[in-house]
Amino acid sequence: MISYVIDTNIFSKSLKNLPFKAFQDVWEPWSSMMKNGKIVSVAEAYEELINYWGSKNSEEFNWLKMHKQFFLKPTNEEGGIVAEIFKSKKFREGVKEKSLRSGSPEADAFLVAKAKVGNGILVTDESDEKPNSEKIPNICEAFQVPYMKKEDFYILLKSIYYEKEVCEQVNVQYALGKSIDLKTFKKEISKFGYSIDGFYSSEYGGLNFSPDLNY
C-alpha cells in the first residue's frame, strides 16, 4: 500500500485557506484516509501546527486534536534515516535554521524518513526549483523518496470524493524536474510488489544513485 506523508505546510495552508464547510470534497477524504492509514504525518509536524493553532479556540484546532493519533512518532528504522540525513552539513544546517526561525521542532527530516521507510509519497508545498537547496524536495531526491505537490494532492482528494478516476491528472515527482502520472507510477511499482525502492532501481526510475551528502 502507498501512503501519503503530509508536510506541515500542507496542513497549515489548507487549514488557513480551505474552510471545512466549503471544501468538504477535500476534508472528508483527507480525514477518512488518515483514519485508514493511507495519510499520515509525524509528531514533529503536529507540534509545529499546535504551536500556531493551539492558542486559538477554533475548528482548526479541534480538527488537529481529533487527528492527533495519526501524527506518528519515529520508529527506530526511521531514526536511522534521520541520522543519515543529518550527516549532510547542508541538510543539517537548513533544518536548524528553520527550527530557530519558527521556534518549534523542525519536521523535515522526520517526514522524509517516514516516507522512505513507509513506502510513501511525501506531500509538500516547498519549492523544488533550486538543485542545491536544503528543502524537502532536495532531501527527497537524495534519499529516493517521491513527492507530490499541493495542487496534485487536492486533485487526488477531490477525485476520491467524487469517485472519479483522475490518476493521469495527478503527478508524482520522483526527482527534481522529473515527474510521472500517478496511474503510471502505480503500474510501475506494481512490478516490484508495490515497492517504491524497486521503482528507483528500475530502468524507468533511472536514478540509481546513492545519496550525495556532501554538496
Image: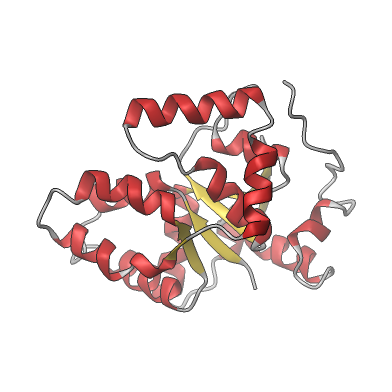
Quarter location, residue 185: bottom right
Residue, far left:
57
Left or right position of 24 against 161: left
Q: Is 29 on the left or on the right of 146, as rendered?
A: left
Q: Residue at image x 64%, y 58%?
A: 76
Nearer to me, 168 or 203: 203
Q: Quadrant of the N terminus?
A: bottom right
Residue located at (20% from left, 49% from top): 53
Residue furthest to the right in view is 203
Colour scheme of this structure image? Answer: secondary structure
Image-quadrant location for residue 87: top right
Relative image position of residue 194 (x, y in whole percent): 75, 70
Q: Which image quadrant: the C terminus?
A: top right
Residue 80, compared with residue 64, is above or below; it is above
Q: Is residue 192 above or below residue 112?
A: below
Q: Residue 162 placed where, x, y %?
A: 40, 75
Picture coordinates of residue 86, whole percent (x, y): 63, 34
Residue 178 is at least partly visible in this image: no
Residue at position x 28%, y 62% in the image: 64
Looking at the image, residue 126 sits to the left or right of residue 28; the answer is right
Q: Nearer the viewer, residue 214 or 164?
A: 214
**Residue drawn at the location 59% of the way across and 56% of the way down:** 114
Q: Say if residue 156 shows up in the picture.
A: yes
Place of residue 89 in the rendered image (x, y in percent of width and height, measured from the top left): 64, 23
> Could you tell whether 43 is left or right of 81 in the image?
left
